[in-house]
Image (cartoon, helix red, strand yellow):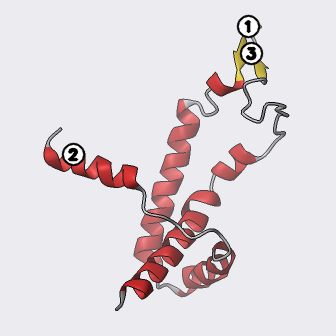
Amino acid sequence: MNDADEKRIAANLAKTLAMLCVRNTKLEDLHAGITPVSKTGDYSDVMVIDAEGREIPWTEVSHLDDETMRALMRQIVNRLYTFHLKADGPGLRETIDRWAAAAGAWDDPEIDQGLLGAGEKKAGGS
């Protein structure tokens, strides 16, 4: 297989996994709702007022509590696990094909240098 084919296959798989195993999860619930208006564009002008009356800048607010993050990560791990074990099954195969077409319209992925660097640091013993 040539380099271009390998990259194309990897890109399609990455986008399909992202669509099926990350996007179509509890993440959609977190994305739902009213998006605040920011005149600066960086949300530094948006404040959240909590139940104790504290004004917290939007840029400093935790948007996920620990339980929500755990539930999201469990669902993503379960979906990745299911994908890897059952991708050839007829039911999942149809779902993959349907969503792969939608994900195909996304931007092509790029190599994540941070991920590569994290592995190199760990392997080097730092």
> In what element is the residue under mark 3?
loop
Identify the residue under disc 2: 122
Amino acid identity at mark 1: Glu
Q: In the picture, which quadrant includes the N terminus?
A: bottom left
Mark 1 vs 2, N-terminal side: 1
Identify the residue under disc 1: 52
Closer to viewer: mark 1 or mark 2: 2
Kindly report the distance in space between the C-alpha atoms of the residues bearing marks 1 and 2: 42 Å
What is the quadrant of residue 20 in the picture?
bottom right
What is the quadrant of residue 59 in the picture?
top right
Kindly report the distance in space between the C-alpha atoms of the residues bearing marks 3 and 1: 5 Å
Which residue shows up at 43% across the image and 87% down it?
5
Tell me whether the residue at label 3 lies in contact with that at label 1, contact meaning CB atoms closer than 8 angstroms. Answer: yes
**In front of the other: 29 or 47:** 47
Q: In the picture, which quadrant includes the C terminus?
A: top left
Q: Which mark is residue 81?
A: none
Residue 107's place in the image compared with 36, above or below, is below
Which residue shows up at 30% across the image and 47% down it?
118
Mark 1 surroundings within 10 Å by alpha-carbon count, few (fewer than 14), some (14 through 19), many (20 or more): few
Amino acid identity at mark 3: Asp
Kindly report the distance in space between the C-alpha atoms of the residues bearing marks 3 and 2: 40 Å
